[in-house]
Amino acid sequence: MLRIALPAALGLMSYAAMQALDCALLGHYNTTDQAGAGLTFILVWALMSPVLGTMSGIATFSAQYKGAGRYKRAGRHLRSVVLLAAVASLPYLLFAYLGPDLVQIVFKADPAVEHAAGQYLRIRLCGAVFFCIAMGTSSFFRGSGDAVTPLKVSIVANLLNLVLDYLLIFGHAGFPEMGVRGAALATILAQAFEAAAFLYLMFSNGKLRKVFGTGFRGRIHWVEVRRLIRVGGPIGAFWFFEAMAWAVFMGMLGSFDAAVTAANFAAFQIMHLSFLPVVGLLQAAQSLVGQYIGAGDPDTGRRRGFLCMRMGVAFMSFTGILMLVFRGTLISVFNPDADVVRVGGQVLVWVAVAQPFDAMAMTALGALRGAGDTIFAFLVLVVVAWLVFVPSTYLIAFPLGGGPATAWIGALAFLMILAGVTVNRLRGRSWEKKRL
């Protein structure tokens, strides 16, 4: 489990690290650009999550086919996911054109913050195809149990993003000073490198071509495309509705001043970074449960799923303690402004309490996805996010006058309910009957 989880966690942290680097460097550039990028990070994920989630469904197929010893079938799905990623990313060019209008529709923020957000969104969405291809191909590797290859690619991409951020945000070494636009451009160039690296491995690596049958030759099997959409589609829908709930949440808090928006985004980034190691455990649970399902041994798959969950809860309980103790210091890394640090420290108290429940929900979801049980989680997410999370946040922040920090109680309630329902599902037997 650790052989999959540790490199998967480190590799997945690269995606958040790109955002965190953008956020931290923009915070030392100016607060307005940081707040604008902060709003847009969530909107980018919300818009792209249907495609990215569908792409990630290939991990279930590569895991189950590997467990069943049917490697060539897994390779056929890899070709399908690259085609699907390229085609499905085309509409994002239209979203890029409408970027500033989308920001104004979703968020009611300070005009300067909205302007920065619109610039960031437009550039990021122009590079959507790179993110989609990188997500799909890396998910194939992780599902098959190889988390080391995506880790190596992501480390290089993240270093590239760091260098480009430094050059393009501040205008060093003769490069133009681009601010928030430079942060967005640096990110899509790094993701373009990731996509190119994975495609090179897919089509040129001799071992992959021999074992999985990848390469330029071989037709697209539309049956595999339909199966991928059937299993991955609910994951994409789950990611979309969850991301939109968080986008609305951050949008409501963005109606306060720029310092409050920056504080909430800094806290959100800290929460994001803290749970990424547990996303590695989610990937391990998905891979292991899928392989044992494919091998006809669901009982061992369940035990591996709960092992991932216990480790995730232990880790995130520890990170919660760190957040409580060092909350001011953590916020100041992203923005040293005194008002930002004060509000952010209050928010991190609620984030710290939510940590173990977040771990339970994520690892249970990973195990269920490994079995192909993706529709149930999507339905639960829609009900809990949009009937509990969003309404309770609005009620606490505005009619009850709780303010931006206390509004995070709604997020805590959302994660507690989601954890309880998904863990109960994993304890049952219905998911064991799923077959791809």
Image (tube, rainbow, N blue to C red):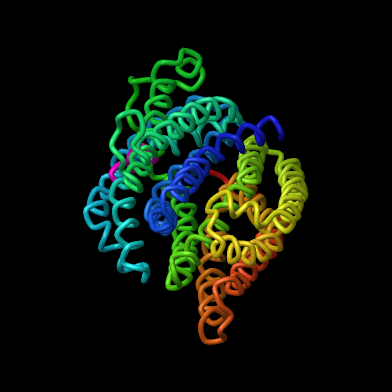
Q: Position of residue 2 (x, y in %)?
A: 71, 33
Q: Position of residue 333 (x, y in %)?
A: 58, 49
Is 346 magenta? The answer is: no
Q: Is residue 259 left or right of residue 426?
A: left
Q: How many marks?
A: 0
Report the front residue among 403 and 244.
403
Q: Determine whether 38 is above or below 145 in the image.
A: below
State the residue lying farthest toward the front.
338
Residue 221 visible in this rendered orientation of the protein: no
Residue 339 visible in this rendered orientation of the protein: yes
* Magenta stretch secondary structure, dominant: helix
Q: Determine whether 325 is above or below 125 in the image.
A: below
Report the front residue among 433 and 308.
308
Q: Determine whether 170 is above or below 242 in the image.
A: above
Q: Determine whether 189 is above or below 126 in the image.
A: above
Q: Is residue 360 left or right of residue 29?
A: right
Report the front residue among 63 and 129.
129
Q: Within the image, what quadrant is residue 287 found in?
A: top right
State the residue lying farthest toward the top.
206
| Residue shown at 29% from the left, 62% from the top | 102
Which quarter shows the N terminus? top right
Q: Position of residue 247 (x, y in %)?
A: 45, 63
Q: Position of residue 134 (x, y in %)?
A: 42, 35
Please give the range of residues in magenta: 126-131
| Residue shown at 48% from the left, 60% from the top | 262
Q: Within the image, what quadrant is residue 216 found in?
A: top left
